[in-house]
Image: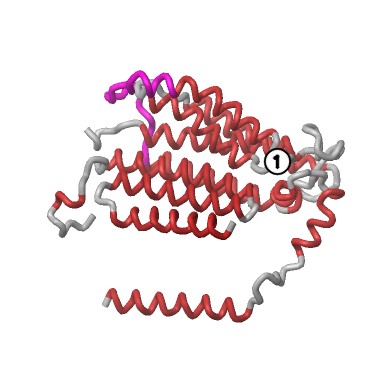
């Protein structure tokens, strides 16, 4: 059980790191959704199914959907931060 | 200057955490309310899911506050995003997206309604089920951007659900009990029709949350002149 929890924590932390490191903003949003998925699995392991359902529905589903739609509305979906030359303020 | 502020902020955060961990003994909660509720909730409210007993039975007013915050947020979002326009210029999704949306729509509808209706028995409830319902109604929109949800119907459903929630609370007032106190017969513990007015309250919450979020998502997905 402890190894499962450790693997889950490593997976979630890796996804959180990926949010910072990805150059494509849409990929970063997807990685943030994976972070929420890992956190909701942790809630299941802590025997809090109510919170886990909320986290999965709102954190992994709805909030990443809203972020992705906001990116599309702002025209940032296909923006690659690396192509901007490094000193962009995005 | 900014890094100094960051270091100061981090130091303050670490200090606060240290104080908290120093004063609270681990695994020994100082709150006694949890134990008391676990002892009395089954006889008081009759809900098999203790979380629902707390959310709607003991702390119904907090849930009403949560609903009004969500309502204010959705209203402000709709105000900023503007009205959804019919006749989008986006091209429709491919065959797989359309077929997947058609397949998932009834499935998500059943799952969402199940979560809402069984909120007093199993984990979940109006908020979680409402989000699933909103996703169910948004998915066909994602596949066929030219169609729009009827915002008139969504507002009607949302308004009726909010009114029903408050009306059930007022009904308890007229019966001489506290606002939003559980009403009606508690029924058999663990049955679908049990624990009085709690399933009705959660149905109202689920419909309200679902219609609010579906209208917010469809507004957000509709394109405006900025994107073209």
Name the image quarter holding the C terminus of chain B: top left
User: What percent of the width, then of the height, locates residue A37?
Assistant: 48, 47
Above or below, B183 relative to B222:
below
Q: Which residues are magenta?
A: B81-100
Asked if residue B126 is among those painted magenta in the image, a careful observer would answer no
Residue drawn 75% across the image and 42% down it: B170
User: What percent of the width, then of the height, locates residue A50?
Assistant: 63, 47
User: What percent of the width, then of the height, locates residue A6?
Assistant: 50, 59
- Which quadrant holds residue B200? top right
Residue drawn 68% across the image and 35% down it: B164
Above or below, B93 relative to B122:
above
Asked if residue B82 is among those painted magenta in the image, a careful observer would answer yes
Can residue B66 be seen at all in this image of the molecule? yes
Q: Is residue B31 left or right of residue A49?
A: right
B169 vs B99, nearest the viewer:
B99
Predominant secondary structure, magenta span: loop
Can residue B75 be seen at all in this image of the molecule? no
- Which quadrant holds residue B25? bottom right
B212 vs B137, nearest the viewer:
B137
Q: Chain of mark 1?
A: B
Residue drawn 60% across the image and 37% down it: B129
Q: Which residue is mark 1?
A: B122
User: What percent of the width, then of the height, locates residue B109?
Assistant: 57, 27
């Amino acid at each position: 059980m402890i190894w499962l929890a450790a693997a889950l924590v490593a997976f979630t932390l890796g996804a959180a790191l990926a949010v910072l490191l990805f150059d494509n903003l849409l990929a970063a949003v997807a990685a943030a959704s994976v972070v929420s998925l890992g956190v909701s699995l942790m809630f299941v392991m802590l025997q809090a199914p109510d919170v886990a359902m909320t986290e999965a529905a709102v954190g992994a589903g709805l909030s990443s959907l809203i972020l992705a739609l906001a990116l599309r509305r702002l025209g940032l979906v296909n923006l690659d931060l690396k192509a901007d030359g490094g000193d962009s303020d995005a | 200057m900014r890094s100094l502020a960051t270091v100061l902020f981090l130091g303050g955060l670490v200090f606060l955490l240290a104080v908290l961990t120093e004063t609270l003994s681990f695994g020994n909660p100082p709150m006694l309310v949890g134990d008391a509720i676990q002892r009395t909730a089954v006889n008081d409210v009759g809900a098999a899911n203790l979380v629902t007993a707390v959310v709607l039975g003991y702390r119904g007013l907090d849930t009403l506050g949560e609903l009004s915050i969500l309502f204010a947020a959705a209203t402000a979002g709709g105000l900023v995003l503007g009205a959804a326009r019919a006749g989008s210029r986006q091209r429709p999704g491919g065959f797989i997206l359309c077929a997947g949306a058609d397949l998932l729509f009834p499935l998500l509808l059943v799952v969402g309604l199940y979560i809402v209706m069984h909120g007093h028995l199993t984990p979940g409830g109006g908020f979680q089920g409402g989000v699933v319902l909103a996703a169910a109604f948004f998915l066909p929109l994602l596949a066929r951007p030219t169609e729009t949800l009827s915002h008139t119907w969504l507002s009607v459903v949302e308004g009726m659900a909010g009114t029903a929630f408050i009306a059930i609370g007022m009904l308890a007032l007229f019966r001489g009990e506290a606002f939003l106190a559980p009403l009606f017969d508690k029924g058999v513990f663990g049955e679908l029709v049990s624990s009085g007015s709690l399933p009705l309250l959660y149905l109202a919450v689920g419909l309200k949350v679902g219609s609010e979020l579906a209208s917010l998502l469809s507004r957000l997905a509709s394109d405006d002149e900025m994107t073209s």
